[in-house]
Image (spheres, rainbow, N blue to C red):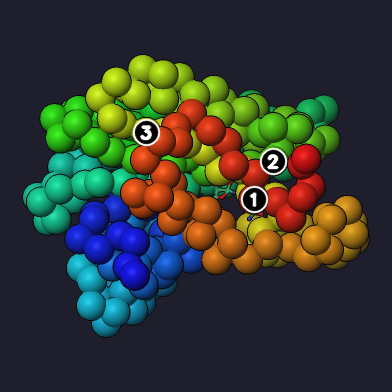
């Protein structure tokens, strides 16, 4: 059974990592996919071809999620190209890790803009469409770091904790219009983002995880599939930890 047959999904940051995994899982489940990227034009083009070959409509758009006007223009373009939108996944995110003592103001601001302000920008841009159709599912990519905190990631933790607060508030505000909003808090998922970490840190993470492995992009995509599909029509305002048991 294809859980997303005929639905159109927006995924920010689809060119690599978790976003790409979500795009592939969603296309397998029949969804049309509009995704953004920041600078990876070649990967975006390759993914567009891969998804189209799976028999769904797919298109990549270069759009900086941190910019309010770009989010608005992007959503308008998707509505013109695809006709409608059923699901928004705010996945784009970056890290600029450092101890607070050494963290620059620019690194704090940039992480907040890309990880948190982007969620505001995209939700504002899609809100009218979802209100008009009286349905919509918004899925925000948080992190276990936003739930629990992490030394060396004050900017990232603040952005992801902010995403969780935003998610719960949107769920309360828009629930009466059948618009759902949930967050996913991935633990240690092995992507290019985590490949930047040093080997000892990676070993430490793996040892501390009850399931004794890092997660895959598919593990996160499957949680998104639940929130995007009609399997979760009575679920909103929730944070699902996809973390191998790191948080209990
Ligand atoms: P990734 O491999 O570094 O990919 C990031 C994606 O976001 C890329 O497609 C990138 O586009 C895009 N992007 C970056 N800045 C953007 C911007 N300003 N506007 C639009 N797109 C932008 O990261 P990932 O590991 O897949 O992480 C995806 C999400 O999961 C992030 O929100 C991250 O915080 C969260 N997360 C990840 C982990 C983990 O262990 N990996 C754990 C918890 C939460 P380009 O390719 O063009 O740069």
Instruction: Please tell me which of labels 1 and 3 falls first in the chain.
Output: 3
Reply above or below: 30 against 120: below
Quadrant showing the C terminus = top right
Pick the front one: 88 or 234: 234
Q: CA distance from mark 2 to mark 1?
A: 8 Å
| Left or right side of 226 for 79 | left
Pick the front one: 55 or 68: 55
Looking at the rendered image, the disc whose residue lies closer to the viewer, 3 or 2, is 3
Q: CA distance from mark 3 to mark 2?
A: 21 Å
Query: Which x, y percent locates residue 179?
Result: 31, 31
Q: Secondary structure at mark 2?
A: helix
Q: Secondary structure at mark 3?
A: strand
The yes-or-no answer for disc 2 within 8 Å of ligand 1 is yes
* Label of residue 144 in the image: 2
Q: Quadrant of residue 69?
A: top left
* Label of residue 242 in the image: 1
Quadrant showing the N terminus = bottom left
Instruction: Please tell me which of labels 2 and 1 falls first in the chain.
Output: 2
Residue 69 in sight here: no
């Amino acid at each position: 059974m294809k859980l997303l047959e005929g639905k159109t999904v927006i995924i920010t940051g689809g060119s690599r990592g978790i976003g790409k995994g979500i795009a592939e899982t969603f296309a397998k489940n029949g969804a049309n996919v509009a995704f953004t990227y920041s600078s990876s034009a070649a990967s975006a083009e390759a993914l567009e071809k891969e998804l189209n070959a799976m028999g769904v409509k797919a298109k990549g758009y270069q759009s900086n999620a941190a910019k309010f006007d770009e989010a608005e223009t992007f959503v308008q373009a998707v509505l013109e190209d695809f006709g409608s939108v059923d699901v928004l996944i705010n996945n784009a995110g970056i890290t600029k890790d450092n101890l607070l003592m050494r963290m620059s103001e620019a690194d704090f601001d940039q992480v907040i803009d890309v990880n948190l302000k982007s969620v505001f920008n995209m939700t504002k841009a899609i809100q009218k469409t979802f209100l008009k159709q009286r349905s919509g599912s918004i899925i925000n990519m948080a992190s276990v770091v936003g739930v629990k905190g992490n030394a060396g990631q004050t900017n990232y933790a603040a952005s992801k904790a902010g995403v969780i607060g935003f998610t719960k508030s949107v769920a309360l505000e828009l629930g009466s219009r059948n618009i759902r909003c949930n967050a996913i808090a991935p633990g240690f998922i092995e992507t290019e983002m985590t490949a930047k970490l040093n080997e000892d840190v990676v070993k430490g993470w793996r040892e501390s995880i009850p399931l004794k492995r890092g997660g895959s992009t598919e593990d996160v995509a499957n949680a998104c599939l639940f929130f995007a599909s009609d399997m979760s029509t009575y679920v909103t305002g929730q944070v699902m930890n996809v973390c191998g048991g790191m948080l209990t």
